[in-house]
Image (cartoon, rainbow, N blue to C red):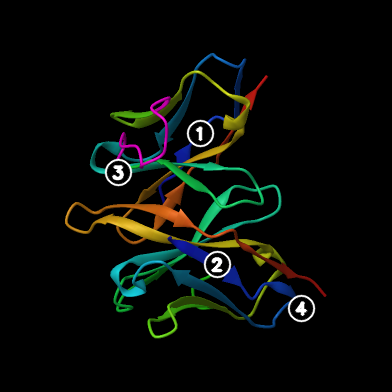
Amino acid sequence: QSVLTQPPSVSAPPGQEVTISCSGSTSNLENLYISWYQHVPGTAPKLVIYNDFERPTGIPDRFSGSKSGPSASLGITGLQTGDEAIYYCATWMNTYWLFGGGTKLTVL
Amino acid sequence: QVRLAESGGGVVQPGRSLRLSCAASGFPLSYYDYVWVRQAPDKGLEWVAHIQFDGSTKYYADSVMGRFTVSRDTSLSAVYLHMSSLKAEDTAVYYCARIMGSRLRNAFYADFWGEGTTVTVSS
C-alpha cells in the first residue's frame, strides 16, 4: 500500500513562512488530488486546502497548496501563533484514504 | 449551519462491541459520502471507513475489516460505526467527516468534521 510521507515537525517565528511537504511512496501524485487538514488535538480537524491548491471559504490566502510530480506542499506565510497545529495531507486512492503522518507546526 | 456531532464513545472491554453515532444537521444527509477517521493516543489521523451517499458502497481499512461496519439512516440524519471484537489498539478519538468532491474526477476531500468521541478499550 502507498504511503504519504511528511516531516514530523517544522518551526518558524511569527511573520515568517513555512512549507510542509507530502511525498508519495510508490506513485506519482500527479493523478491524485491532495487535501490538507489543520488539527489541534481534541478539536475538529479543519480543511485548509483541497484539490491540491484550492482554499475553502474562510481560509486566508496565507495558506497555499501546490503539487509537482511525486510530492505536494502546503505553504503558510505571515505565520501567526494561531497557526500552531498538526497538519496532515490526505488523498483518496479509489478504495481507501491515505493520510500522511502529520507535521507539527510550531510558531516560536 | 453544517454540523456533525459524534456520540457513543466510552470505556469497553476487549472483545466487546460499541456503536458510534454521527448526527448530521444543516444539510441533507443523503447528498454526501462520509468517513470515519480515528486518532490513537500520540498517533496521527488514520482512516477507518467510508460510506457512499446512497449507502450502496462501503470501504474499510484493513485494520478494521470484518470487525467494523459503517451504515447510515437518512430518516434520523445519522451515520453509524458499529465496532465489534474490539481490541486495545482500537483505543482512539473517532471523528466523522462529510465528504465533498467529484466522483467523475475521483477527487474527494473532507470539508466538515465533528469534534470526535473517545473510545477506550481496556479490561
The chain carrying label 4 is B
Magenta: predominant secondary structure element? loop
Depth check, mark 2 against mark 1: the one in front is: 2
Distance (Cα) linking label 3 and label 2:
27 Å
Q: Amino acid at mark 3?
A: Tyr
Q: Amino acid at mark 1?
A: Gln
On screen, residue B65 above or below A32:
below
Q: Which residue is mark 2?
A: B5
The location of residue A75, given as percent across then percent down, is: 43, 24
Q: With A99 as the anchor, is B43 left or right in this view?
A: right
The chain carrying label 1 is A
Question: Which residue occupies 33% across, 53% down?
Answer: A93
Q: Are marks 3 and 1 on the same chain?
A: yes
Distance (Cα) linking label 4 and label 2:
24 Å
Q: Which residue is mark 3?
A: A33
> Which secondary structure, mark 4?
loop
Question: Which residue occupies 24% across, 54% down?
Answer: B106
The location of residue B10, given as percent across then percent down, is: 72, 73
Q: Which residue is mark 4?
A: B13
> Which secondary structure, mark 2?
strand
Question: Which residue occupies 48% across, 63% down?
Answer: B3
Looking at the rendering, the stretch of residues picked out in magenta corresponds to A51-63
Q: Which mark is residue A6?
A: 1
Residue contact at pointers 4 and 2, CB within 8 angstroms: no
The mark that comes first in sequence, 3 or 1, is 1
